[in-house]
């Protein structure tokens, strides 16, 4: 995961996600130890929320963030799908500029997950959403959501892992440069 995480953040930086004056709020779903959210904080994110079904994973993610002296962090112990669909049930009412989804490949329906993300009240316009998925799935489409709310920016393969970068309801205020041709397969 180290090389993939490095590639993830290299692409996010090239997209200008952490560029001033943006105050990025990151949502790290399927967080595990929280390494993606902590890395986002170290790159300049103002805050991070960790989501995982495991209470132990949420506790570890918070400990790891606080061990690095990051204070504006919280954890939601729930499925990513539930946290995205009904955030008030889990005490989550913040809106986000970066959402990362790194699920266990065999335990998720990517179509359902994409629909939950696209319909979530948690995303700000121009939010960058990153799906990690297996190459065996093929390529995710260049637009996701029932109303094409998620527009493909980049789709990059790293061995068996693919990272699909999307913009949520892009306004044009942030120069994200969509590249739909990258979603045509490998």
Image (tube, rainbow, N blue to C red):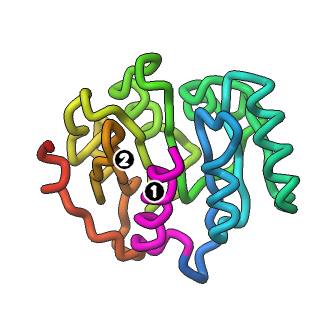
Q: Position of residue 66 (x, y in %)?
A: 86, 53
Identified at 59% across, 54% down, the residue is: 96
The front one of 112 and 38 is 38
Farthest residue, direction top: 107
Q: Earlier in the sequence, mark 1 or mark 2?
A: 1
- Do we see residue 158 in this rendering? yes
Identified at 25% across, 28% down, the residue is: 137
The front one of 36 and 101 is 36
Q: Position of residue 159 (x, y in %)?
A: 31, 42
Q: Residues within 10 Å of mark 1 (few under 14, many from 20)?
A: some
Task: Considering the whole magenta stretch, tell me its main secondary structure.
Answer: helix
Q: Which residues are magenta?
A: 1-18
Q: Is residue 38 above or below residue 34?
A: below
Q: Is residue 169 left or right of residue 125?
A: left
Label 1–label 2 contact, CB within 8 A? yes
Q: Is residue 117 above or below residue 142?
A: above
Q: Quadrant of the C terminus?
A: top left
Q: Is residue 155 left or right of residue 130?
A: left
Classify residue 78 by image quadrant: top right
Which residue is labeled 1 in the image? Answer: 8
The front one of 160 and 84 is 160
Q: Position of residue 38 (x, y in %)?
A: 70, 54
Q: Is residue 163 left or right of residue 46?
A: left
Q: Find out whether residue 26 is within the magenta segment.
A: no
Which residue is labeled 2 in the image? Answer: 163
């Amino acid at each position: 995961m180290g090389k993939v995480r490095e590639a993830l953040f290299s692409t996010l930086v090239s997209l200008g996600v952490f560029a001033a004056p943006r105050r990025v709020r990151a949502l790290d779903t399927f967080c595990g130890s929280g390494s993606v959210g902590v890395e986002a904080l170290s790159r300049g994110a103002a805050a991070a929320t960790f989501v995982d079904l495991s209470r132990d994973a949420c506790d570890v993610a918070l400990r790891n963030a606080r061990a690095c002296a990051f204070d504006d962090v919280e954890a939601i112990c729930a499925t990513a799908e539930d946290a995205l669909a009904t955030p008030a049930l889990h005490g989550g009412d913040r809106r986000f500029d970066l959402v990362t989804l790194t699920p266990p490949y065999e335990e998720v329906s990517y179509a359902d997950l994409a629909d939950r993300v696209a319909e979530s009240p948690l995303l700000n316009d121009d939010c960058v959403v990153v799906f990690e998925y297996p190459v065996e799935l093929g390529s995710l489409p260049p637009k996701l959501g029932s109303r094409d709310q998620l527009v493909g920016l980049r789709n990059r393969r790293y061995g068996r892992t693919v990272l699909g970068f999307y913009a949520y309801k892009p306004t044009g205020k942030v120069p994200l440069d969509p590249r739909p041709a990258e979603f045509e397969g490998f």
